[in-house]
Amino acid sequence: MVPLLLVLLLVLVLAGAGFAVKILWWVAIAVLVIWLLGFVARPKSGSGRWYRW
């Protein structure tokens, strides 16, 4: 019974990690798109950088 519970726990942990990694990939893609749009839509005057850092 204990090995079966350990296997089920491992499956749940791996499924949860896979879901979290997938969400993080979508967040990373969204940040990349916003960053690239910032270069396209940067102001013409000033230093040309739209971010402050």
Image (tube, helix red, strand yellow):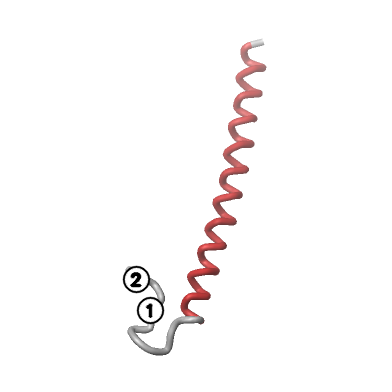
User: Which residue is at the front of the view, 6 or 40?
Assistant: 40
Rendered view: 50 above or below 20? below
Q: Which quarter of the rendered picture does the C terminus lie within? A: bottom left
CA gap between label 1 and label 2 equals 7 Å
**What's the residue at 48%, 75% (across, down)?**
38
In the displayed structure image, the side of residue 38 where residue 21 appears, left or right: right
**What's the residue at 50%, 74% (across, down)?**
36
Rendered view: 48 above or below 2? below
Residue 51, position in %: x, y? 39, 72
**What's the residue at 56%, 62% (across, down)?**
29
Q: Which residue is mark 1?
A: 49
- The amino acid sitting under disc 2 is Arg
Are the residues tagged 1 and 2 within 8 Å (C-beta)? yes
User: Which residue is at the front of the view, 22 or 43?
Assistant: 43
Q: Which quarter of the rendered picture does the N terminus lie within? A: top right
* Helix, strand or loop status at disc 1: loop
- The amino acid sitting under disc 1 is Arg
What's the mark number on residue 52?
2
User: Which residue is at the front of the view, 24 or 49?
Assistant: 49
Rendered view: 47 above or below 11? below
Residue 40, position in %: x, y? 50, 81
* Helix, strand or loop status at disc 2: loop
What's the mark number on residue 23?
none
Q: Label 1: few (<14), some or many (≥20) within 10 Å?
A: some
Q: Residue furthest top?
A: 1
**What's the residue at 57%, 44% (across, down)?**
20
